[in-house]
Amino acid sequence: MTNPAKSIRIGTMIQSTEGKAPENIARIADLGFESFEPFFWQTTSGQDLAELGKRCRDAIGDRDITISTIGMFGNPLETQEKDLLTLEGWKQCIDNAHHFGATCVAGFTGRIRNQVLTDSLPRYKEVWSELAKRAADKGVKIAFENCAMDGNWQTGDWNIAHNPDAWELMFNETPDDNIGLEWEPCHQMVYLIEPIPQIRKWAHKFFHVHGKDATIRWDVIREHGVFGKVPFVFMRTPGFGDTNWTDVISELRLAGYQGSIDIEGWHDPVYRGDLEMSGQVHALNYLKASRGGDFIPS
C-alpha cells in the first residue's frame, strides 16, 4: 500500500556547486530524509549535469528518496560575468532536470540592480518568457523562491519575487502555467506577513516548498523598530522558530499541494556549525510529526 503521508515529503537541500552532491547525498541518505534538492550558486561550474544527475540517483540507490526539484540561485537578469553564468546555468538545469528525476527548477528571478522593483519587469518578461517555453517543452516547472536577499520594493539585487504584490505583477507578465513559486514562510515573516492566509490564496502557484522558519523578536521591534541596528528577526531551522508547521502542512494539504518540503539549513544562529546536522535532523522529525506522524492504514 502506498503511503499517502508522503504525498508531501520531507527532505533537505544539497550543495552542488563544488561537484560533491553525490557524496553529500550518500553521507546523509540514511538519516531519514525523503527527498533532496541539489542546488547551484550562480554557476554550475562547468559540470556535466547529465552525469551529475546520474551520480546523485546512484547515491540514493534503492532508498525511497526522490529529487523533485533542483536549484539555480543567482541573478539571471543582469549582464555581469556571474549573471551570464547564472542564466546559462538555468538553461542547463532545465535541459538536464530529468537526469536527476526532477520536474522543477527553482531559484531567484533576478533583478535590475539598485532600481525600483517594477523597473525589472520588462527584462523579467524577456528572460522568463523564453525560459518558460524552454521548460514547458521539457515538462519542467519553474519556481521562484520568495527571498528578498536584503532587497525591498525600492532597491535590491537578486530577486523580485519576495512580495505578493510583486507576484501579481510577475504572473501578469508571464502567465505561463509552468511558472510559480518556491515558497517558505520565513521570507514572508521577515516582512511581518502572515503565512497561513497566503497559503490559502497562493498555494495553486506553489511548485516547491522550503523548510525554513523565523523567530520574530517583538521586544526589539517595540524598542528599535524594524530594519534598524538591532536585528528584529532571525532565520531558523523548522522546530526552533515561530511557525506552526502543523497548520502550514494542513493548509498545504487542503490546497492540494503534493511535493516536497526541503529543509534549507545553514541559517540558524544556534544550530549551525557542529550543530548543523543535529538541527536539520530535529527539523526533519519535527516536520514529519507536523505532517501527522507515522502513517497508519485506515
Image (spheres, rainbow, N blue to C red):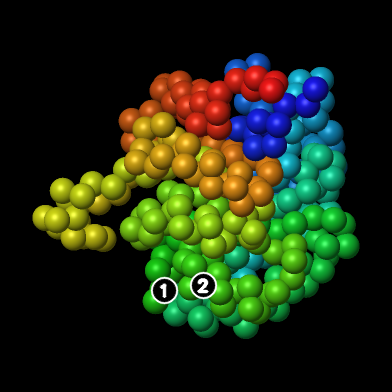
Which kind of residue does numbered mark 2 sit on? Answer: Ala
Seen from this angle, which residue lies furthest left? Answer: 223
Query: Dot 2 surroundings within 10 Å: few (below 14), some, or many (20 or more)?
Result: some
247 or 104: nearer the eye? 247
Locate residue 290, reporting x and y percent.
50, 31
Seen from this angle, which residue lies furthest top? Answer: 30
Q: Identify the residue under disc 1.
A: 153
Seen from this angle, which residue lies furthest right? Answer: 137
Describe residue 8's horizontal placement relative to residue 155 as left or right: right
Image quadrant in which the C terminus is located: top right
For the point 44% across and 80% down, which residue is it? 116
Image quadrant in which the N terminus is located: top right
Res. 282 in view: yes
Marks 1 & 2, CB-CB < 8 Å contact: yes
- Mark closer to the observer (1, 2): 2
Q: CA distance from mark 1 to mark 2?
A: 9 Å
Label 1: state its secondary structure. Answer: loop
Which kind of residue does numbered mark 1 sit on? Answer: Trp
Determine whether 245 is above or below 280 in the image: below
For the point 85% across and 41% down, which residue is it? 99
Describe residue 287's horizontal placement relative to residue 97 as left or right: left
Label 2: state its secondary structure. Answer: helix
Determine whether 34 is above or below 165 in the image: above
